[in-house]
Amino acid sequence: MNDLYTPRELMVVAAAREIRDREVVFVGMRLPLLGFALAKATHAPEAIGLFENGVIRDRPAEAFIYTMGDPPNIVGAVACLGLLDVMSLLQQGRVGLGFLGGAEIDRLGNLNTTSAVGETGPVRLPGSGGAGDIASLAGRTVLIMEHEPRRFRRKVSYITSPGNYGGRRRGGPATLITTLGVFDLRHGGFTATSLHPGVSPEEVRRSTGFPVDIPAEVATTIPPSPDELAYIRRADPDGFWTRAAVKAG
Amino acid sequence: MPGAQSSSAKPNSKRRSLTDAIAENVFDGDAVALGLALESGIPFAAVHEIIRQKRKDLTLVGPISDMAFDQMLGAGVAARVVAAWVGNVAGGSGYAFRRAVENGVPRPIEVEDHSNFTIGLALKAAAMGLPFLPTFTGIGGDIVKAHQGIRPIEDPFGGPPLLAVAAFQPDVTIVHVQRADEDGNAHLWGNLGLTVEAVYGARRTIITCEEIVSREVIRSDPNRTAIPGFLVSAVVEEPGGALPASVQGYWRRDFMPFLDYHRTSRTPAGLRDWLQEWVYDVPDRATYLQKLGEEALLRLRVRDQRLAAPANFAP
């Protein structure tokens, strides 16, 4: 794409922009860890982060973390509770936004992290973790995925994290951030909100296993600002999250 | 800890060596809950001792299990998994889990999929002495379909439909905590995950801890006692017993072993070699720490202090 920032850095910035100030966010793992920290440092200083291991934070971790359970994510937390405490807040409806990843997605925004079809037969994936709960109960979800044809399926073989379905009482997938663009999923289909710099509509269509609506005048994703990039590189100095491939699940 | 053999313990003490704690409390066919704080405090020393004692047909119960369940499945000690996520948080897939599910190697296993919330509710229901707990989570997804422990129910008060999550009672729950007294009263801090529910819901509990402290230390801060000792069957002083997982205030996460295991366990032969080197050829945790080496221990041991402000309990 270019040598100024990596695709992952752009995705972190896009994830951060989805967080509203004062919002309660179910943060999850990997890129959203950085997205939450970036949002706190920029436009959403009063956002609250929940982690499914029971941690509640109102400021980012002081040092780089690999997982939500790493000691720097505990020190300086507002509270360290149990899993059911934060899941209860989610079920109550107090969580505005949750982040999700998946190995496979379909046109309804259903995510599969349980069982995929591989070249030599079924492939067992790790499973839900808290993803199915966030998908069921958050006020809205933002999905983050690699944009590859094998991951974008007309219908996933297993719904680990439910997308849009009839009779849904709350929430559902709002935004999908991929390696190619940002998509609006709120209306039951895929509409491109913006394509990342240098990405063509053809490339998106080729990489998506079902129809995707790309308006003729579709915007270009705003690249990370120098400040945003500087912040990400301070938070992830070795590029562990931002240079490596996006992980499924 | 070498000096903590049961033979030297007082007759009624719960203090045990890890070998004895596992021998006396974990039996073939048991449902064993562990990895309950999620990525931290995983009782890896106990996991490896269970493998060395060659338990059979266990049911492994937990939310996410990082690589502990994968190692147990690779060693063939389990017949069933009741969990929300089985893999390697640093690497992704758990290859031994995959081989067990996809090819029945080293033995076929049954998997009961959960989400973190539903496995938590199953343990909480057991902890509360209830047959089930209701929830809205999972509706619209496949985990809850044709699930032996989750069924649709009506709200008797006329609200929208719910799911009932059946209680799940572990035979034994194993947790690694910062400190406990000889009676098993345990102080833990940091993220709790499902630790408390799994202990309250289990028939037996094994505590491994960084330090055995006096009863007075525990009683100085009763709000930090998440596990009352009368629920505990055995308490084992096992410093570093959660490594490579972190223990707040004691050990940082040792990141490389997770990636090394992920890489090595990709093939059955690699997994066999890994188990030989890190489990079968390592008789106890003290030897494991020696094998890690002084340099690694210096890097991993927490020496800084970020002490909580004292709380005044004066009457």
Image: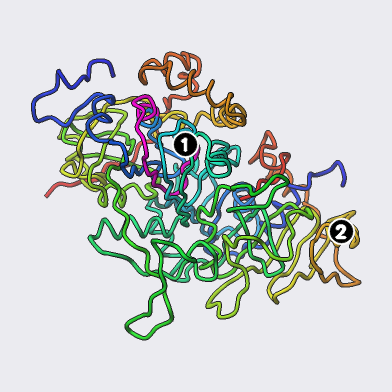
> Magenta stretch containing residue B63, yes or no?
yes
Residue range (magenta): B48-68
Judged left or right of residue A230, residue A171 is left
Q: What is the crowding at mark 2: few (fewer than 14 residues within 10 Å), some, or many (at least 20)?
A: few
Residue type highlighted by circle 2: Arg
Left or right, B147 with reference to B184: right
Hey, which residue is sitting farthest left in the picture?
B11
Residue B253 shows up from this direction: yes
Q: In this orientation, which residue lies closer to the viewer: A230 or A177?
A: A177
Q: Residue at x 70, y 75 (%)?
A: A188
Report the disc number at residue A38.
Answer: none
Tag 1 secondary structure = helix
* Residue located beneath label 2 in the image: A206
Between B181 and A57, the residue placed more toward the observer is B181
Q: Is residue A66 visible?
A: no
Closer to us: B242 or B187:
B242
| Residue B15 percent location from the top left of the image | 19, 28
Q: Chain of mark 1?
A: B
Query: How far across and down, in percent of the image, does residue B22 sit?
Result: 28, 30
Type of amino acid under label 1: Leu
Q: Chain of mark 2?
A: A
Residue located beneath label 1 in the image: B73
